[in-house]
Image (spheres, helix red, strand yellow):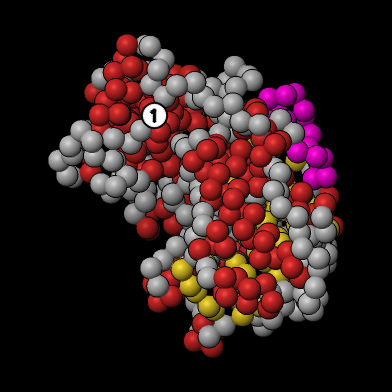
Amino acid sequence: MWQQVLRVRPLPEDDFFLLGGDSLLASEVVTRALAVLNLDAALGSTLIRALLATPTLEGFTAAVRDARSGSGRAAGPEPVVDFVGETELGFALPPAEGPAPRPRDPKDVLLTGASGFVGAFLLHRLLRSTGARVHCPVRATSPAHAEQRVRTTLARYGLRLDEADWRRVECFPGDLTQPGLGLSTTHTAELARRLDLVVHNGARVNFLYPYEQLRPANVDGTREVIRIAAPRRVPVHFVSTVAVVAGFGTAGVREVAEDLPPAHADGLTMGYAESKWVAEGVLRRAAEQGLPVAVYRPYEVTGDRVHGACNTETAICSLFKTIAETGLAPDIELPMDFVPVDHLADSVVHIATHQQADGRVYHLTNPRPAMLSDVLERMRATGIALRTLPYAQWVGELVRYVAANPTSATTPFVSLCVDRSRHADMSVKEMYLKGTFPVLGRSNAEQALAGSGLHCPPVDSALLDRYLEYFFTSGYIARPAHAPGLGTPRAAAAESEHAA
């Protein structure tokens, strides 16, 4: 299985990740093991943890052997994490000194995550709406490589900048997992001296890995950003996720206002959400010492309003792709709370440059969401034949499909459907269903965006059709034969803009 996935013949002592393995290949090798050996899909997360803990071929073989025997020793017991304790900042902010930052008219902005989907739109909006120089740490081998990664991402999503704009972009190698973001002390000191604003959007996004694996980038990286911002109290605007409130739902809380103190981290049951919950807590600790902070929690970040260009490496896109390929969909009330990425970027940049960073949380959600059934209706309108199944039956079909297609786009996300919540008899995916996931208040966001002209478009037929058309034209989903068509993208765009 390792040889098939890694395309090399491994020795027993070889390390999976040193042979070229990554999180996607890890999910594939685990999926192959589950399928070939007819193991319960619920053991997937256990085997992922075992592979991370002992990434040698002989170590993984021992973990699979334990899983087959039912000994429960495959990865040992899941570690108990004190999430509140994890939010300790760990250092005192230095006395504020130097010229006060000017976030309303920034001259220098630090943007993390610029080579990703949301980061590319944030960079584009920062350059278009401010005169700032934007500093972008990127995982890269050189400044030229860092800039090329960012340019490639912008081009992928149809974002254009002229060379005058690029002269205001400074890309350089950086790493959230390293002290000082991997920069020299001279570089971090220069940033601390010049910055007017920080937009901390970078993170390691992985729905398979446990909290411990994501802590270095998502939690410790946030601490490093705070260290740079602290000397002059530069405002830090943090892009989080609504997933941090999922524990409220399984605890029976039906509504979560933006100002409700976070709780129930032990009910999140997903390492990524846990790491974001802790990162928010670290920022609150810094805010208690005087650092200006703002937190943004978007719901499902989807394609832009003009082209519908989506990041297809997401759980929701993989769900649509699998439904189209299998013709089977779960009969569930799953909200489609879509926030187009350009609206998200516009909103974050507007709030960051017009509102004081006073510790407030902003729920950037869609006031007019749809349901999965609405998406299925639009998929049927394109000619895709679908039928729905009860959730448990659909999960069984999903597991069989992924076992037969271990390189499927949905392989890394199967754990969301089979892993059980720590505090409720449901899967992680079911924690997000209507009636379980709490209703999110939006008063801070609405107040901050009032008069800005920024309005999140409704998740209506026009928006859904635009996304489906993007999936078809990009080849992500095969266009149905004899499809009746969705109209021209331009016409659909006009219709959605009018509705918005």
Question: Where does the image place residue 15, in percent across and percent down from the top left?
Answer: 28, 41
Q: Nearer the viewer, residue 388 or 57?
A: 57
Question: Where does the image place residue 143, in percent across and percent down from the top left?
Answer: 43, 75
Is the stretch drawn in magenta largely helix, strand or loop? loop
> Based on the displayed image, in which of its 4 quarters is residue 92 positioned?
bottom right
Magenta stretch: give its range.
247-262
Where is the N terminus found, in terms of image quarters? top left
Q: Is the residue marked by circle 1 packed among few (<14), some (14-19), or many (20+) residues within 10 Å?
A: many
Q: Which residue is mark 1?
A: 50
Q: Is residue 443 above or below residue 12?
A: below
Q: Is residue 437 visible?
A: no
Q: Is residue 162 visible?
A: yes
Disc 1 is placed on an element classified as: helix
> Based on the displayed image, in which of its 4 quarters is residue 180 positioned?
bottom right
Please tell me which residue is depicted at 70% across the width and 70% down the height of the picture.
Answer: 197
Query: Is residue 107 magenta-colored?
Result: no
Please tell me which residue is depicted at 15% across the width and 40% down the height of the picture.
Answer: 9
Q: Nearer the viewer, residue 122 or 343?
A: 122
Drawn side of residue 167 relative to residue 264, left or right: left
Q: Nearer the viewer, residue 126 or 91?
A: 91
Query: Is residue 249 magenta-colored?
Result: yes
Please tell me which residue is depicted at 54% across the width and 37% down the height of the picture.
Answer: 211
Q: Is residue 390 above or below residue 302?
A: above
Three-letter code for the amino acid on which mark 1 is drawn: Ala
